[in-house]
Image (tube, helix red, strand yellow):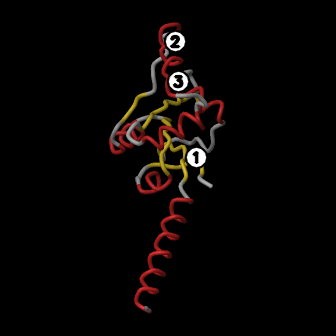
Amino acid sequence: MIHRFGLLAFFVLACLQAGSVRAERSVVLVTNEECAMEAMSMLDIRKAYFGIAVSYEGRLVRAFRLNNDDELSHIFFQTVVAMSEKSYERRLLSMLLKYGTPRPQEFRDIGALVAALRRSDCGIAYLWLDDATSQAGLRSIRLLWQSD
């Protein structure tokens, strides 16, 4: 009986621990360490992800997308561009056809995204906080989303 209670207590604590880790998930906007940008308004972030020219101290801000995680993509569409994926894709196509505005570069591999950010003068990307802190050469400049 005591063994079963101990096993049950361990299981409950493990579930609570997993829930608390999940509850602390955050998405941040990152740039490379060389970029002097300290913060960026949501309006400028949104413009950059629509391909509209945004500059910081004379440097063009390039937006990069990580497209390998459905939950992260969902947060991007809801929080950053505030529209559905279908509407966002239509808007990008419209901007390309009307003004020749390039699409943000997309990556399926976080390593390739980080390498592109390091090469860019002032590139931005959104990442899970855990991923952002584990990558050398990146700096978080804004909290975009945090779970409850």
Residue 25 on image: x %, y %: 53, 55
- Is there CB contact under 8 Å for labels 2 and 3? no
Res. 88 mark: 3
* Label 1 vs label 3, nearer the camera: 3
> Judging from the image, what secondary structure is the residue with disc 3 in?
helix
Vertical order, 98 against 134 (above or below): above
Taking the spot 50% from the left edge, 70% from the top edge, the residue there is: 17
Q: Which residue is mark 2?
A: 94
Residue 102 on image: x %, y %: 45, 18
Residue 47 on image: x %, y %: 59, 26
CA distance separating discs 2 and 1: 30 Å
Q: Quadrant of residue 7?
A: bottom left
Residue 105 on image: x %, y %: 41, 28
Mark closer to the chain start, 2 or 3: 3
Q: Which residue is mark 1?
A: 141
Q: Residues within 10 Å of mark 1 (few under 14, many from 20)?
A: some
Taking the spot 54% from the left edge, 33% from the top edge, the residue there is: 77
- Is there CB contact under 8 Å for labels 1 and 3? no
Residue flagged by tag 2: what amino acid is it? Ser
Vertical order, 40 against 133 (above or below): above
Taking the spot 41% from the left edge, 53% from the top edge, the residue there is: 136
